[in-house]
Image: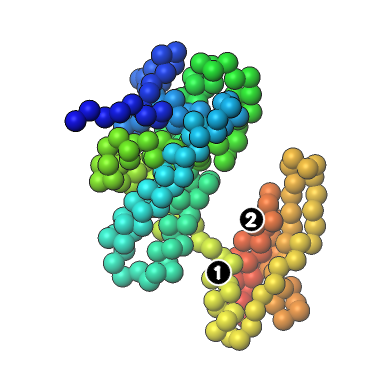
């Protein structure tokens, strides 16, 4: 039985090979081929359906299931809430973009942009959201070509560092603080105390308020980051009191 040619199966005649001696070796990198749709941004074609967006949608589901299955087997004694916390970090935009960088997917995107004569490739590749979408689209394409079992193992290997980081270092201090305060029948609110810097380089300072009093303060390049640091300081103060 012959497979019919599909848009995401057709390889570009103008794209150059991407994998080279400098490319990181991994199961996932080995499965990724130079496919037009995987590395085509929606702004480069008149038909969005021929861009990576559909494969990104599929790859997002494959990634989530692969990581969930891995965590379920690896952490048999952890509650659902902890498994969900770890998975959320591992499949986050930040994590996906980091994996895309490690796999060198920006080079694949650049080659596709050159083949299409796209003039905004540099700006597109600087976007964390685009790099995160690329790795999900690549996973989607690999799933169609190779099936879930083979791709799941490759995904777990590629994201293993993100899993380890989430298990050992990444802590959601806001959630931990909220849970500890709930046991004391108290709650926390966050207030942005200060915003500084130009629009493209904002800095925020947030305050964790408990019972009308400041319990912690933190700064960061986003409100979320500043609130996490404020929560960490508040958690330390709460445990010392």
- Image quadrant containing the N terminus: top left
Percent across and percent down for residue 206 are 72, 62
Question: Is there any visible trace of residue 170 in the rendered image?
Answer: yes
Q: Residue at x 49, y 31 (%)?
A: 50
**Is 98 or 143 nearer to us in this picture?**
143
- Give residue 25's position: percent from left, percent from top: 33, 30
Q: Which residue is mark 2?
A: 225
Q: Secondary structure at mark 2?
A: helix
Q: Nearer the viewer, residue 170 or 43?
A: 43
Question: Which residue, as the protein is rendered here, is positioned at the far top?
Answer: 14
Location of mark 1 (residue): 175
Residue 114 percent location from the top left of the image? 53, 16
Q: Position of residue 67 (x, y in %)?
A: 36, 53
> Which residue does the image show at 61% across and 77% down from the upper left?
238
- Displayed quadrant of residue 225: bottom right
Q: Residue 185, relative to residue 119: is it above or below? A: below
Residue placed farthest to the bottom in the image? 185
Q: Quadrant of the C terminus?
A: bottom right
Q: Are marks 2 and 1 in contact (CB under 8 Å)?
A: no
Q: Which mark is residue 212?
A: none
Judge whether 186 appears above or below 198 on screen. below
Residue at the spot 39% in from the left edge and 69% down from the top edge: 80
Q: Is residue 205 left or right of residue 133?
A: right
């Amino acid at each position: 039985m012959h497979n019919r040619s599909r848009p995401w199966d057709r390889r570009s005649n103008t794209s150059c090979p991407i994998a080279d001696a400098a490319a990181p070796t991994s199961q996932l990198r080995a499965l990724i081929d130079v496919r037009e749709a995987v590395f085509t941004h929606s702004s480069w074609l008149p038909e969005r359906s021929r861009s990576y967006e559909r494969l990104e949608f599929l790859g997002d589901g494959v990634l989530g299931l692969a990581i969930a299955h891995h965590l379920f087997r690896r952490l048999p004694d952890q509650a659902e809430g902890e498994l969900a916390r770890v998975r959320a970090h591992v499949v986050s935009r930040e994590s996906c973009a980091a994996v895309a960088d490690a796999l060198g997917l920006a080079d694949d995107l650049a080659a596709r942009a050159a083949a299409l004569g796209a003039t905004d490739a540099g700006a597109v590749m600087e976007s964390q959201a685009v790099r995160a979408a690329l790795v999900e689209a690549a996973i989607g394409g690999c799933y169609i070509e190779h099936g879930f079992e083979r791709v799941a193992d490759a995904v777990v290997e590629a994201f293993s560092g993100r899993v380890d980081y989430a298990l050992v270092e990444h802590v959601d201090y806001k959630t931990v603080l909220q849970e500890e305060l709930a046991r004391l029948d108290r709650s926390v609110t966050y207030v942005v105390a200060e915003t500084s810097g130009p629009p493209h380089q904002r800095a925020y300072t947030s305050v964790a308020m408990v019972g009308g009093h400041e319990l912690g303060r933190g700064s960061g390049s986003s409100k979320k980051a500043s609130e996490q640091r404020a929560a960490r300081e508040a958690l330390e103060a709460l445990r010392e009191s």
